[in-house]
Image (tube, rainbow, N blue to C red):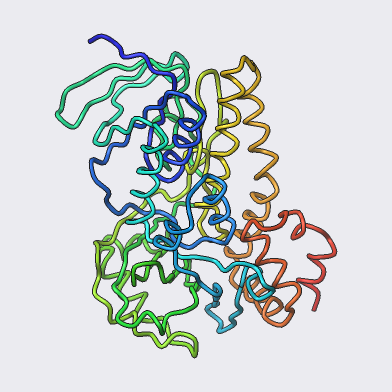
Amino acid sequence: MRAEHVEIVVVGGGPAGAVLAARLADARHEVVVLERAATWRWRAGGVFSSPAAVAALRRAGINSATLLAVARPIPAMRVETAGGTSFRLTYGADAGGEPAVGFDRSRLDPALLEFARRAGADLRLGWTVTELDPVAGRLQVRGPDGQFARLRARVVVGADGLRSIVARAAGVDRPPRIGPRIGLTYHLRDPDPTTTRDARMRLLRDGYVGIAPVAGGLVNVGIVLGRTWQDALARQGGRAVADSIVAAIPATSDDAGAWRNGSPTDGVVGAWPLGHRVTRRAGPGWLLVGDAAGFLDPFTGEGLHRALASTELAAAAIRARARGGRGAFAAYERAMQRRFLTKDAVSWLVQAFLARPALFEYAARRLASRPAVRATMGLVMGDLVGAGRVLNPRYLAALLAP
């Protein structure tokens, strides 16, 4: 097989891969996107996002009409503990800011791929990477017809999610430090979307469930379960466990509960293991973006906004390298650390509270009764202000003091 020479190969055509490809193609770079799925299908991924993700899509060039079609405004996320405490995070919407949103990924993902295609990216759907040397830029791929081909690229970008082949081939993937968890997710057709307003995050024993209304009259159900659920999942299966968890969620005054009677629009999709860790996000000739660059837990909103923010930094690094900047990819690594290190510390702090239900209940009661403290937490969780605010001793004292 003769190798086809290209400038940039992006492995993975999800939101991170598509937006990065569009940015690079718009800057006159030659970009090939390899996406293993020939057509869109639901895979576990983020749907609820703070206004920061919408702002990032606008910066990438996504127009208002597309955003209206793929995103449903959500006034708040209601967090509910097993002990009965609840509070709403509005992400600044109650102070005049934009609301959080629920994305219909069946509309968002194809729209972003089409955006990349129109920018000039070469989309190759149904192509699977079978061999890869990211440092040398050598790839072997299998096309939708089953035939193999070889590519040579100056830059290889891993935008291929939690089990990134690029991260594995570069030798930087590691098991997550958090305990093993499984994610279950699916959608329901909402019989009456007018009665489902807020998103909800309800804590369970060794896990939690998120309910989010999304564009297109759908409700997304996302469940994260720890080790103690493994026996039940093995005996009953994902659908039965998910149904029992959802059936136990009580209705609230802001949620009439009609969504529970909606018919499923897809099967229960699992993600295992849920987390992903890398020792580096860049090396000679390669970069990682989106979930491939590391993912801890969806509770703290690490998904779509972080993926989109990483594409901004990666596009700048690739453009700088093309202009002769030898240290551009090392600068990308440092920029990613600066951008997310403090938020990662907050995420670990939240995980420490989640692992101790009594401690989380204590903090939740204070968040429920202290509006200013709660508002700051919402802005930090939504990536709208620096995460360092939550780690400030004065803030921690305001949160935890009796």
Residue 202 placement (x, y as % from top left): 49, 74
- Horizontal side of 250 relative to 264 (left or right) equals right
Q: Residue furthest bottom?
A: 253
User: Which residue sits at x=78%, y=65%?
Assistant: 396
- Picture layout, residue 60 above or below residue 239: above
Which x, y percent locates residue 323?
Answer: 61, 17
Instruction: List the single residue furthest toward the top.
Output: 2
- Quarter of the image where one finds residue 358: bottom right
Quadrant in the picture for the N terminus: top left
List x then y, in percent, for residue 264.
Answer: 25, 70
Residue 392 position within the rendered picture, expressed as x and y whole percent measured from the top left: 81, 58
Left or right, residue 247 beside residue 376: left
> Which quadrant holds residue 103?
bottom left
- What residue is rendered at 47% in x and 48% in y? 275
Q: Nearer the viewer, residue 378 or 30?
A: 30
- Residue at x 32% of width, y 62% of height: 231
Kindly identify the residue that appears in the image at 42 percent across and 56 percent down: 66
Q: Within the image, what quadrant is residue 92 found in?
A: bottom right
